C-alpha cells in the first residue's frame, strides 16, 4: 500500500494562464508552511514537478524525506499559446474553443498545448512509475492544479467535467490510498489548520 500526498505548490499571484511558464512561488506565509509540514508524514519519499514554483515549494517541506529528482511529467497543463494570456484575451482570441475547453474537457487541447486526456495520461503514467519506485509507504508529490486534479479524478472515478468542478487550493493536500490497482480517495483540497 502507498499513500499519495498531493500538494499544490505555493501561490504565484499570476492573473493569466500559467502552465509551463516558469514563475516563482510566494512562500512567505511561514505559518501556513509550518502547518503543512506538521500535517505531512515525516520520512516520506518526496518528488516535485520540475517547474520552479513546485521545486521551491518542495524545498520548504521538512521531515527528513527521501528526495527524488524532480519530474517534467508532473507539470501543469501545457496551455500552448494561451500561456501568459488573461482569460479575457483567451476568450477574445478563441471564443468557442476557450469555452469548450472548460465546459467539455477531454480531447480538446489548448492551441499548441495539451488536452485533459494528454495531462491525465502523462501524470498517471508518472505516478504509477513513482509508486513502483517508492522507498516508503508515503509519497509526497508537489505539483499543479491540473496534474493533481487528474489523479483525484482517477481515484474518484470522475469525468473531466466533474473534476473541473473541484477546487485545489495552493498549499493544499489531497490524499489517495493506493492498494494494488485499487485507488481510494481519502481527502481532497485539505488546507492544514
Image (spheres, rainbow, N blue to C red):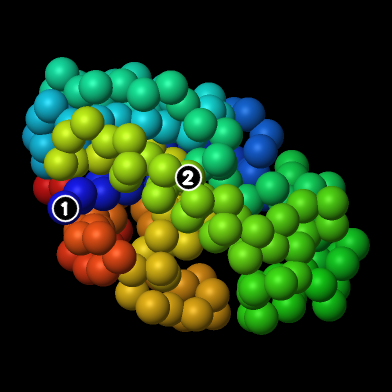
Q: Secondary structure at mark 1?
A: loop
Q: Secondary structure at mark 2?
A: helix
Q: Splitting the image into 4 quarters, where does residue 131 fall?
A: top left
Query: Gap in Å between the C-alphas at discs 2 and 1?
Result: 17 Å
Q: Is residue 41 visible?
A: yes
Badge 2: how crowded within 10 Å, few (<14), some, or many (20+)?
A: some
- 65 or 97, which is in the foreground? 65
Q: Position of residue 182 (x, y in %)?
A: 26, 68
171 lies left or right of 3 = right
Q: Which residue is mark 1?
A: 1
Q: How many marks?
A: 2
Q: Splitting the image into 4 quarters, where does residue 9 fall?
A: top left
User: In the rendering, which numbered label is found on residue 75?
Assistant: none
Q: Which residue is mark 2?
A: 126
67 lies left or right of 77 = left
2 and 1 marks in contact (CB < 8 Å): no
Amino acid at each position: 500500500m502507498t499513500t499519495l500526498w498531493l500538494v499544490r505548490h505555493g501561490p504565484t499571484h499570476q492573473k493569466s494562464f500559467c502552465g509551463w511558464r516558469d514563475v516563482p512561488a510566494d512562500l512567505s506565509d511561514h505559518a501556513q508552511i509550518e502547518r503543512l509540514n506538521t500535517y505531512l508524514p515525516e520520512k516520506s519519499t518526496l518528488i516535485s514537478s520540475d517547474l520552479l514554483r513546485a521545486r521551491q515549494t518542495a524545498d520548504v517541506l521538512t521531515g527528513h524525506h527521501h528526495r527524488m529528482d524532480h519530474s517534467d511529467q508532473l507539470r501543469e497543463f501545457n496551455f500552448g499559446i494561451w500561456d501568459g494570456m488573461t482569460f479575457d484575451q483567451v476568450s477574445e482570441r478563441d471564443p468557442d474553443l476557450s469555452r469548450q475547453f472548460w465546459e467539455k474537457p477531454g480531447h480538446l487541447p489548448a492551441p499548441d498545448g495539451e488536452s485533459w486526456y494528454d495531462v491525465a495520461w502523462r501524470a498517471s503514467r508518472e505516478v504509477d512509475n513513482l509508486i513502483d519506485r517508492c522507498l516508503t509507504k508515503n509519497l509526497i508529490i508537489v505539483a499543479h492544479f491540473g496534474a493533481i486534479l487528474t489523479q483525484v479524478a482517477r481515484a474518484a472515478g470522475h469525468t473531466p467535467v466533474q473534476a473541473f468542478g473541484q477546487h485545489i487550493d495552493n498549499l493544499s493536500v489531497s490524499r489517495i490510498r493506493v492498494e494494488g490497482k485499487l485507488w481510494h480517495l481519502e481527502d481532497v483540497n485539505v488546507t492544514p489548520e
